[in-house]
Amino acid sequence: MRIVTLATTTLLAVLMATFAHAHAFLDHAEPRVGSTTPTAPREVVLFYTQNLEPAFSSVEVSDANGSRVDQGKPRISASTMRVGVKPLPPGTYRVRWQVLSVDTHTTEGNFTFRVGP
Amino acid sequence: MSALVIVRDIHFASSIIVAGVVFFDLFVASPVLRSDLRFSKAQFYFREAAGNIFWISLALSMASAVAWLCLLSMRITGKAFGNVIADGTIWIVLSQTQFGFAWEMRLLFGVVLGACLLLLRKKSEGPATTWLMTAASLLAAAYLGALAFAGHGQEGADMADIHLAADFLHLNAAGLWLGALVPFALLLSSLRRFTEDGWMSAAAAAAGRFSILGILAVGILLVSGTINAAFLLGGMHNLIDTGYGRLLLLKIALFAVMLFLAGINRQYLLARLSKVGGTDLGSRTVQQLIRSGAAEIALGFAIVLIVGVLGMMAPPNDIAGHIH
């Protein structure tokens, strides 16, 4: 019985495998951080190093005057967060993000990209 | 030290003791004592005290789990305690995050574990008791091991399951060794206190069984700890170059001292007890085992303090993320 208990505990350890993650740092984005793109993007996509908690992750895109140009609530799937943006005229845009990884650590950051020649 | 670190430390320590008391009963105390009427006083004293330790630890574990949830909600949102209650943030964390899901499961395991222990108090020896004790041990393992879901466990996406399994086993090995040290010292003290006929043989038997469990636990701790370090450190140089690594090095050093003490217990004290049982030297040897156990407990909970701090830091492998 005790051997069964030890074996079962070990098996439980192997079977119970999904969640815990670590700090979610920004891995890369589209448009790329600091890049200049000739064509205005329709959405901004951020790729993180860990999976995110949708309930506590957000992103804002604003123009040079500080006016928001994103289209509200982002869509989050695993470690990717994407938000639609309004038609963007040439200029510099700032992306501010704040995320919660699934192991409960928050990270935040911001970067800019340009639309134009 | 922040309130969250303190609450985490209390939670880890009490959860390890909860599991340790249950594991010790199944693998050591019950087989050794087995309603042996020669040790009726010692057994009664031990079971009463171990039971109190279990219930106090379970209550502390549950209370600190609630505190952890509240403090975490405050940290995530930057809001005050009253606000995270009033605006439902705590409920969102509990119901819409993976941490919250893990906490719900752990609460369920803890409640059912408590129910098992209550049922066990009413049962005498028999098959039903053995099944209940087995169920209690599995629930205790699930309750303690599920803490892995609240920590670092997804570094190296392809190997995430291995890291999580290592975390689960690491926690339960801590329960099997550090958590069980508390009832072990208590059992030896109980037997020595009443000096009933044959008590030294029982002490030697308990120490022998616990020693085997300790070897198993140390093996698991070494392997799982190495796996965890490989995932989190991102290179051996980070043991020295980073604050996280230096703290981990301190944890490893304390573990090595614990291992040294356990080695002395097994190779020297236990060996001596098996030869001189029934004499004054035997009684003094048991006393030395108790003192050594107390020293191991102190070292073990110093390790738990470090674990509480490490969990709040970004492992070096995380920081090595890059931006394109």
Image (spheres, coloured by chain):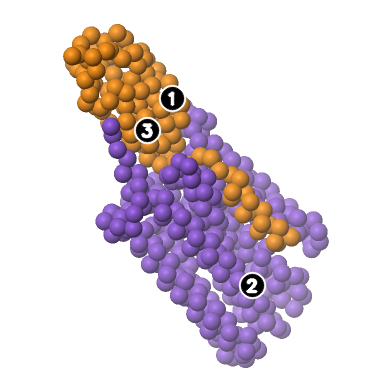
Chain colours: A orange, B purple
- Residue B252 makes an appearance in the image: yes
Residue drawn at (68%, 82%), measured in percent from left and top? B201
The disc at residue A76 is 1
Mark 3: which amino acid? Answer: Tyr
Mark 1 Cα-neighbour bin, 10 Å: few <14, some 14–19, many ≥20: some
Q: Residue at x 48, y 42 (%)?
A: B158
Residue shown at the point (46%, 58%) measured from the top left = B225
Q: Residues within 10 Å of mark 2 (few under 14, many from 20)?
A: some
Does mark 3 fall on the same chain as mark 1? yes
Q: Secondary structure at mark 2?
A: helix
The residue beneath circle 2 is: B209
Give the letter of the chain under mark 1. Answer: A
Chain letter of the residue beneath label 3 in the structure image: A
- Asked which quadrant contains residue B81, the reply is top left
Say if residue B72 shows up in the picture: no
Q: Are marks 1 and 2 in contact (CB under 8 Å)?
A: no
**Label located before the other in sequence (1 or 3):** 3
Q: How dense is the environment of label 3, judged by Cα within 10 Å: few (below 14), some, or many (20 and up)?
A: many
Q: Amino acid at mark 2?
A: Arg
Chain designation of label 2:
B
Frontmost residue, B203 versus B234: B234
The picture places residue B302, in percent across and down from the top left corner, at 41, 62
Furthest-right residue in this view: B126
Nearest-to-viewer mark from 1 and 2: 1
Marks 3,2: beta carbons within 8 A: no
Residue A48 - label? 3
Q: Quadrant of the C terminus of chain A?
A: top left
Q: Position of residue A77 (x, y in %)?
A: 46, 26
In the displayed structure, does residue B188 sit left or right of residue A32?
A: right
Establish if B15 lies above or below B193. above
Q: Quadrant of residue B191?
A: bottom right
